[in-house]
Image (spheres, grey):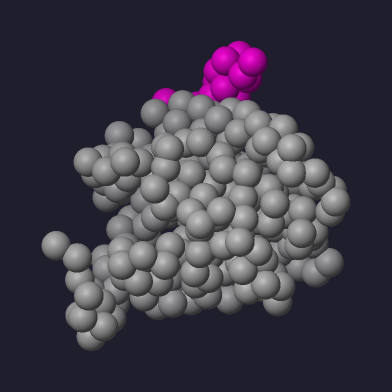
Amino acid sequence: MKIRNPHLIRAAGWLGTQVVRALVRSLRFEYHALGPPVMPPQPEPEPRSIYLLWHETLLLPLTKYACPEVSTLVSSHADGQLLATVVRTLGLTPIFGSTNRGGMQAVREIIRDVSGCRHLAITPDGPRGPRRVVQPGAVYIAAKTGMTLAPLGVAYHRPWRVRSWDRFAIPKPCTRAKVVSGRTFTVPPKVRTEDLEQHARLVQAELDRLTRIAEYWAETNKFDDAVRAGDRTDH
């Protein structure tokens, strides 16, 4: 059942935030950069970044790296209102829209909203899927704002999974949680529409690679082996 009463949404959002914060604090968290570190906060004049992570893994990064420098894209549908309340309580700024819903007009509206923000977090397969498929809207936003695309691999050790389109992952308390960053991407400001898919495929390949590394690392706790395993299957 969806919550539509604004008072209940605020109460549920506040309660959910406290639970998530307590859960994330209990995790055995590690971050590794396969390249220059990109996670916030970064001092000026570091480039403005669009952090890309799969919808199923957003629980940890949005909590661990919550700060006023980061805005995050939230769906404008009913479920998104609850998430927006959680996002505000964590200290981030929600921006309503979707990279795959409503076409390029919706993406252009998002670009106007992010013009003043430092960094942006996007789930390029959200809010409705397909699961783990990069939509070109995020690439278009990078082209029109000059922001750098920074894919992230995020994984938990044997998390609970929700029966949803993305198999949303909920980490178990006190278990391993890993985040990996790697190659970043810039997109030409005058990129042609027909070239958006090519850039999206490059981002897709890196997100897939970083996800494999993070998942192997979370499972085995052996980072070097995880990197070798992730690179071996990256074709």
Q: Is residue 10 above or below residue 221?
A: below
Q: What is the quadrant of the N terminus in the image?
A: bottom left
Front residue of 22 and 215: 215
Front residue of 133 and 147: 133
Q: Is residue 26 above or below residue 85?
A: above
Q: Position of residue 189 (x, y in %)?
A: 84, 54
Q: Residue at x 54, y 24 (%)?
A: 226
Q: How many marks?
A: 0
161 with respect to 118 (left or right): left
Front residue of 56 and 197: 197
Residue 178 seen in this snapshot: no
Q: Which residues are magenta?
A: 220-235
Q: Position of residue 30 (x, y in %)?
A: 51, 45
Indicate the quadrant where residue 68 lies.
Answer: bottom right
Q: Position of residue 111 (x, y in %)?
A: 67, 66
Q: Position of residue 190 (x, y in %)?
A: 85, 51
Q: What is the quadrant of the C terminus in the image?
A: top right
Q: Residue at x 43, y 62 (%)?
A: 75
Q: For residue 233: magenta?
A: yes
Q: Residue at x 22, y 75 (%)?
A: 4
Front residue of 11 and 22: 11
Q: For residue 51: magenta?
A: no
State the residue lying farthest toward the left. 1
Q: Is residue 195 above or below residue 94?
A: above
Report the magenta stretch's main SS: helix
Q: Residue at x 27, y 43 (%)?
A: 164
